[in-house]
Image (cartoon, grey):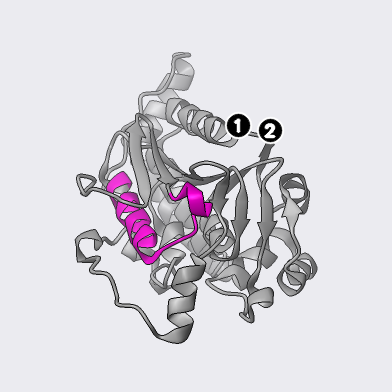
Amino acid sequence: MSTVEYQDIIYTVKDPVAIITLNRPDALNAFTTRMLAEIRHALAAAETDENVVGIVLTGAGRGFCPGMDMGALDNLSSGSGEAEDLSALRASPGDPALGENFQITYTYLQAVRKPIIAAINGACAGLGLAVALLADMRFVERQAKFSTAFAQRGLIAEHSISWTLPRLIGSGNALDLLWSARKFDGAEAKALGLAERLVETGESLDAAISYIEDLAANCSPTSLKVIKAQVHRHLNMPLGEAMQETNDWMAQSLEREDFREGVRSFIEKRPPEFKRVSV
């Protein structure tokens, strides 16, 4: 699957990390329909690659992603332009067993079977911010600039951001950022709870890679997959249902070789040797 030649992203794998780099630096990596299709295709490729334990999504140059390319938005608003044939990029990343909540537009990101970290190195706004919030974690650089942007374009809170943002930073803070569309930096993103790590300029990618390398060295990839599914699914479920599912999945984990290896490696005081995950 990863043999497809991408135009708007760069996809690289260096065990145990897959890096998806948005690669339109002259436009600060603004999304095109092609880029969004290529990201989806690359995530599916990463899922099937047993060398990949985790995935980093980042931007080339000075930006992460300021949202949709304004030219594409202009064509959309005017009804002009011909649709590009992207059939070669069709892909279905994410575990369909997690349910319909994770099969609508970009919510598939939360169903991808491996951790996704957004390494935010610059401008991150609009749909770019919405996608970053659907990643599992965000490592942001201090100088990165954020904005929801929607209200200033005559739009509403799009693409699940009205669901993700309040859960990360609370409803009042979410409304402030959505109503005002004001700009804020990486330090405020960390203070608000939007980001999990704050790093200096140029350090987000290396920090995300190091984090995944540490996961790969010490944690079961199967456990990472199941824990991700638990967290995202259980945000959509009542406590009792979430607890019952956890009990069922815990019983399954006790039967896995990874559980035995985790216990033995601890007793023997050696690094664990867990099996990798591929679809």
Q: Quadrant of residue 170?
A: bottom right
34 drawn magenta = yes
Q: Is residue 243 visible?
A: no
At x 60% / y 33%, what residue is drawn?
202
User: Measured from the top left, where is residue 66 in percent x and y?
Assistant: 57, 59
The residue type indicated by label 1 comes to Glu
Q: Is residue 196 above or below residue 260?
A: below
Dot 1 and dot 2 residues touching (CB under 8 Å): yes
Judge by depth and name the residue closer to the eye, 178 or 29: 29
Instruction: Please tell me how crowded label 2 is: few (under 14), some (14-19), or many (20+) other residues with Cα within 10 Å.
Output: some
106 drawn magenta = no
- Across the whole image, how many numbered discs are drawn on residues? 2
Describe residue 235's horizontal placement relative to residue 147 as left or right. left
Judge by depth and name the residue closer to the eye, 70 or 276: 70
Describe residue 241's horizontal placement relative to residue 20 as left or right. right
Instruction: Please tell me how crowded label 1 is: few (under 14), some (14-19), or many (20+) other residues with Cα within 10 Å.
Output: some
Residue at image mark 1: 203
Q: Does the magenta stretch mainly form a helix, a strand or a loop?
A: helix
The residue type indicated by label 2 comes to Glu
Magenta highlight range: 24-46
Residue at image mark 2: 200
Q: Is residue 192 visible?
A: yes
Judge by depth and name the residue closer to the eye, 84 or 142: 84
At x 27% / y 43%, what residue is drawn?
278
Callout 2: SS: loop
User: Measured from the top left, where is residue 1 in percent x and y?
Assistant: 20, 49
Judge by depth and name the residue closer to the eye, 75 or 16: 75
